[in-house]
């Protein structure tokens, strides 16, 4: 578990009980593993907002699923509550990424019904990802279509270059504005021609 694991009290109804709590229960199943992963939980990322300098947000076509690619290489997934909410048992998160010649699957994740976000701590830079979130309902309600989002994580070196170029570009703009104001002041006050002074008119005699 990347987050603190639940104590090993794996009773039959523990999964359903944890879904009613404020934390998010989940299981990570590694690709090719037959057994289910350990039951873990994570606190929700409430109030998170993707700022322009810290991350880049990628949205699914419907806008219900958002992948926030952070500068540290992690990706925070956020999604809206599905409709209808009655009978919702949880979510299934499927991940894959593009290789040179084929697409490779990532670890699949089972999330509780109370989950509204999930953190991918380590995403490969320069790789195009495809993440699909599938709501799961109790039978006989069929599952709605999965929400999918595709994005590419910038390499760490490229992110540093972009940040440095942004900082340098802002400094250059400030210097150019200062130079323009200085040139305008010099042109207006020092280099503008001044006409000759008008001599005083002699007074006529009475």
Image (tube, helix red, strand yellow):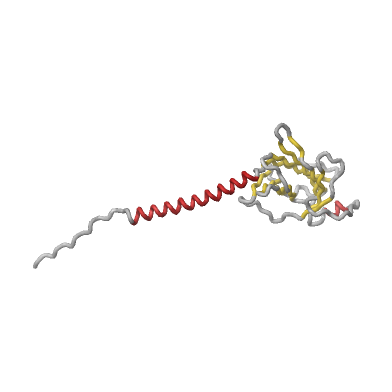
Relative to residue 48, is residue 35 drawn left or right? right
Is residue 68 at all visible to an observer of this figure?
A: no
Residue 144 place in picture, x, y as percent: 77, 42
Relative to residue 185, is residue 145 drawn left or right? right
| Farthest-out residue, top | 101
| Farthest-out residue, bottom | 206
Using the rendered view, name the quadrant where residue 132 is placed. top right
Residue 158 place in picture, x, y as percent: 62, 44
Which residue appears at 82% of the width and 55% of the height?
A: 20
| Farthest-out residue, front | 157
Which residue appears at 78% of the width and 51% of the height?
A: 2
Residue 186 place in picture, x, y as percent: 36, 54
Please name whichever residue, 24 or 62, is drawn nearer the observer in this view of the structure. Answer: 24
Which residue appears at 74% of the width and 50% of the height?
A: 117
Q: Give the total of numbered labels.
A: 0
| Farthest-out residue, left | 206
Relative to residue 75, is residue 52 drawn left or right? left
Residue 179 place in picture, x, y as percent: 43, 52
- Quadrant of the snapshot with the C terminus: bottom left
Which residue appears at 65% of the width and 45% of the height?
A: 156
Please name whichever residue, 132 or 8, is drawn nearer the observer in this view of the structure. Answer: 8
Is residue 95 at all visible to an observer of this figure?
A: yes
């Amino acid at each position: 578990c990347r987050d603190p694991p639940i104590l090993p009290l794996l009773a039959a109804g523990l999964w359903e009980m944890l879904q009613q709590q404020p934390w998010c229960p989940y299981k990570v199943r590694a690709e090719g593993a037959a057994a289910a992963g350990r039951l873990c939980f994570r606190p929700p990322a409430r109030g998170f907002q993707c700022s322009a300098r810290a991350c880049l947000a990628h949205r699914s076509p419907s806008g219900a699923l958002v992948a926030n690619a952070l500068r540290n290489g992690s990706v925070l997934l956020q999604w809206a509550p599905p409709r209808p909410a009655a009978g919702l048992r949880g979510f299934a998160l499927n991940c894959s990424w593009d290789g040179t010649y084929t697409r490779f699957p990532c670890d699949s994740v089972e999330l509780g019904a109370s989950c509204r976000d999930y953190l991918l701590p380590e995403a490969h830079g320069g790789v195009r990802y495809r993440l699909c979130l599938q709501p799961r309902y109790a039978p006989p309600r069929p599952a709605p279509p999965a929400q999918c989002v595709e994005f590419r994580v910038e390499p760490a070196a490229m992110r540093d270059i972009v940040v440095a170029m942004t900082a340098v570009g802002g400094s250059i703009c400030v210097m150019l504005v200062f130079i323009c104001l200085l040139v305008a002041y010099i042109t207006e006050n020092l280099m503008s021609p001044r006409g000759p002074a008008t001599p005083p008119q002699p007074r006529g005699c009475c």
